[in-house]
Image (cartoon, rainbow, N blue to C red):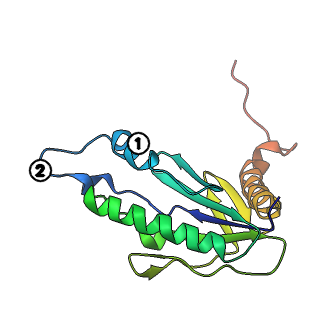
């Protein structure tokens, strides 16, 4: 496995109300299938689910993925402008997955620098820069404990419930 992997997550959170072009809103999947057909560089991947998009670039060099992702972001930014689709740069995040403590060079969308993060949440899973499940498991454990605290009064043995007759 390569030593460096970049992951741009939620780079394009689409506001479908901004897609109106005089004749109504086109189907999101029909519109997005056009840009997914565009050829991407080898070792680059696009993952989409609903309105969330993940761009991934793999390389053993820590600068190559940034340049490849920046090329894709520039192409997609132009494509979104042509289709009058708006995406939220402020909900975007940029993570370098690597065992080494290197950060890849920053990428921009519409001249706005995407903040570098140590973890990212995508489709309910939390990925950290070393691809361990520690952040995800801590989050799920915290949520489970909060729900258990809500149920604790019902689980007490001294709780008396009236019995219907």
Task: Identify the image quadrant of the C terminus.
Answer: top right
Nearest the viewer among 47 and 160 is 47
Residue 105 falls in image quadrant: bottom right
Residue 3 drawn at (x, y percent): 81, 68
Total number of numbered labels?
2
Residue 76 drawn at (x, y percent): 41, 61
* Residue 89 falls left or right of residue 130: left
Task: Identify the image quadrant of the N terminus.
Answer: bottom right
Residue 136 drawn at (x, y percent): 75, 59
Tell me if label 2 and label 1 are in contact, CB under 8 Å: no
**Residue at horizontal 57 percent and vertical 62 percent from the top:** 9
Q: Secondary structure at mark 1?
A: helix
**Residue at horizontal 40 percent and vertical 81 percent from the top:** 111
Q: Secondary structure at mark 2?
A: loop
Which residue was labeled with disc 2?
22
Marks 2 and 1, how far apart in space? 21 Å
Which residue was labeled with disc 1?
33
Q: Earlier in the sequence, mark 2 or mark 1?
A: 2
**Residue at horizontal 60 percent and vertical 51 percent from the top:** 123
Nearest the viewer among 124 and 54 is 54
**Residue at horizontal 42 percent and vertical 69 percent from the top:** 74
* Residue 99 falls left or right of residue 97: right
Residue 94 drawn at (x, y percent): 60, 71
- Residue farthest along the left direction in this orientation: 22
Mark 1 surroundings: few (<14), some (14-19) or many (≥20) residues within 10 A? few
């Amino acid at each position: 496995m390569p030593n460096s992997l970049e992951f741009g997550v939620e780079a394009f959170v689409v506001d479908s109300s901004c897609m109106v072009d005089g004749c109504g809103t086109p189907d999101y999947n029909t519109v997005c299938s056009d840009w997914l057909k565009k050829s991407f560089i080898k070792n680059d991947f696009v993952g989409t689910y609903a309105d969330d998009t993940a761009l991934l670039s793999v390389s053993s060099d820590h600068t190559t993925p940034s340049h490849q992702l920046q090329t894709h972001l520039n192409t997609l930014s132009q494509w979104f402008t042509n289709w009058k689709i708006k995406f939220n740069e402020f909900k975007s995040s940029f993570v370098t997955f690597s065992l080494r403590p290197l950060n890849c060079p920053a990428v921009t969308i519409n001249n706005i620098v995407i903040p570098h993060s140590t973890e990212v949440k995508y489709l309910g899973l939390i990925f950290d820069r070393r691809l361990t499940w520690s952040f995800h498991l801590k989050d799920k454990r915290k949520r489970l404990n909060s729900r258990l605290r809500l149920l604790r009064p019902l689980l007490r043995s001294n709780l008396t419930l009236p019995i219907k007759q």
